[in-house]
Amino acid sequence: MTTTTTSIGGGGEDRVLATAQQIVKSLNTPKEVREDMLLIFSSFDNRLSNITDLINGEDSKAENDRFEAAEKVIFRWESNSEAHRNSVPWEESPDESGEYLSAVDEILTLMEGLSVRSDNELVDRAENALQIAMTRLEDEFRHILIRNTVPLDLERLYGSIRRVSLSFASNDGEIYEEFESFGEEDRDAGRFHERGGSLGDTDVDLIHPDAVVELKEIAERMIRSGYEKECIQVYSSVRRDALDECLVILGVEKLSIEEVQKIEWKSLDEKMKKWIQAVKIGVRVLLTGEKRLCDQIFEGTDETREICFNETAKGCIMQLLSFGQAVAIGRRSPEKLFRILDMYDAMADVLPDLQQMVTDEYVVIEARGVLDELGDAAKGTFAEFENAVQSEASKKPMLSGEIHPLTRYVMNYVRLLVDYSHTLNSLLDTGEEELQRLQGLPNDDLGIESMSPIGHRLLLLISNLESNLEEKSRVYDDGAMQCVFLMNNILYVVQKVKDSEIRKLLGDQWVRKRRGQVRQYATGYLRAAWSKALSCLKDEGIGGSTSNASKMALKERFKNFNANFEEIYRIQTAWKVPDAQLREELRISISEKVIPAYRSFMGRFGSQLESGRHAGKYIKYTADDLEGYVLDLFEGTPGVLHHLRRKST
């Protein structure tokens, strides 16, 4: 088909062009569609061939107008930016900030079209305006972050934390002033042990929620404009400082490994407690909140979001890990074990969350490494404690024969260890050496094979304590005193086992065996303490029957018995049996053994002396007198036989 050209003059051509242009405009279609329609029109009439240039010219003019309007907004804010910022914050002037963001959007949209055109001047102007806008937005992004950071509210936060306090002395109020080998640096340091509290579900606002929308809008423009790096730097820098401030509020200081290892124990213990809470709060509250904040502000940009969080969190995490490592590689001493176990538990508890949030492999590897080091420190410290119990060699006797500080310390220590059975079972193992030692114990029927690792180690530990106590009992020359000392201490061990979770680890058979051991010591005491006195009440050697026994021999027997009894009374009223039931049982055993023998001897031979001169010099006591005096034994205060002194005067 041939195109027809009609000559109707210049005015007619203009009218045709104007009419076609008006038709296309009235359709309100996109630019690409309009251009296609014009090509179709021009194929019918060559007078329409210039219409494309006309419309492109109009589009170019419209683009220039929009650019100049947007540029004007950018420059207007730039000219009074400082004054405006000081008077009305960005987030509190939504109309003006919205206008500014729209201007940035306009320039970005125009630049996408300019990139394929050759108008270098307009491209330069657009890039300049965009650079100015990005500088402005970068500053506003920083100021909004800083202004809207929410300080950490410890009072509110700790309200959600349940504190659990455990007395290291197990409510006995025991102080280990006599104990020379344990806690030399600070004898009271290990007296009370406080477990780290548990943290419930706690959300905190790190940034005022209303500001998050503003931050997100600015971040979107900066990333779209190619200023992603600057956005990340500003965000991570401000939020890193905010997290550092949170650690300060939580009591975590920036200390080098060398500085940590120079801190004396009492101060270090406080720092360890604060670190435990800081780890829990840091991961479960602060970093979780920081991750949520990054997800909101950088929604839709996964890589940017990931980088921002990693860069923000890294400093906080590494500071916590540095302290944990310093403690782990520090000097090992028994009083540190429970706090190290608390640190290990806290780290193990938050590590899965940390690994899920942090994608920086270096940080994750460091966290795992510190957890392993804390585990090694716990195992090494436990071994130090075992060695210390075995080798503690203080020779100072307990004057009253009561419970040795070593026994108190070890058993209260062991009771706390049971609270960490789950952790210690995962850390400890029963090696070849331990197995050989277990097999060498006289406990074949205790079911050692079915015991847990912590059960094995506690069995060995208490066996070492018992061996040490046997050795310490030898400092007493008096065999009866040895028995009282061992009786007191073994009973204390049994009671601590029986009344705690240790019983489940060692078993009822262990308790029964030790109770039998206490009874054996009681029998040994009676034999060592009273055999000499009781021998005075025997018939042998008196020189005849009941009716014609030698008065001289009888006088000697009564005199010797009195002397023995008075010596026992003088000494053993100063001895102490702390357990009321054991004390009563011993007194009953003494009475059952001594009083009937004395009453029988008196019944058979007393009458031969009572009729003679100075009878009271030999028969000083009735059976009831003796029974009363027996009740004074083992009170820990030296007694005086007032009744005797009154009679003798």
Image (cartoon, rainbow, N blue to C red):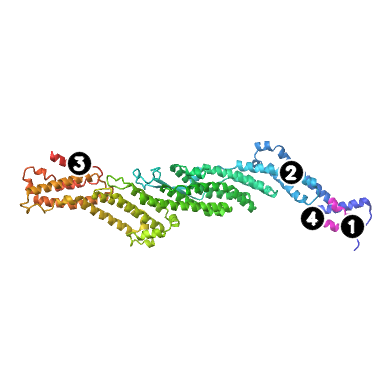
- Locate residue 214 relative to residue 572 in the image: left or right: right
**Mark nearer the viewer, 3 or 2:** 3
Residue 640's mark?
A: 3
- Cβ atoms at labels 3 and 1 below 8 Å apart: no
- Give SS at disc 3: loop
- Tell me the amino acid under the disc marked 4: Glu
- Give SS at disc 1: loop
* Type of secondary structure dominating the magenta stretch: helix
Where does label 1 land, which residue?
45
Q: CA distance from mark 1 to mark 2?
A: 43 Å
**Mark nearer the viewer, 1 or 2:** 2
Q: Which residues are magenta?
A: 30-55
- Locate residue 638 relative to residue 415 in the image: left or right: left
- Tell me the amino acid under the disc marked 1: Asp
- Tell me the amino acid under the disc marked 2: Ala
Q: CA distance from mark 3 to mark 1?
A: 141 Å
The quarter in which the C terminus is drawn is: top left
The quarter in which the N terminus is drawn is: bottom right
Disc 2 or 4, which lies upstream in sequence?
4
Q: Is residue 144 above or below residue 3?
A: above
Q: Position of residue 118 (x, y in %)?
A: 81, 49
CA neighbours of label 2 inside 10 A, class few (<14), some (14 to 19), many (20+): many
Q: Position of residue 234 (x, y in %)?
A: 63, 44
CA neighbours of label 1 inside 10 A, class few (<14), some (14 to 19), many (20+): some
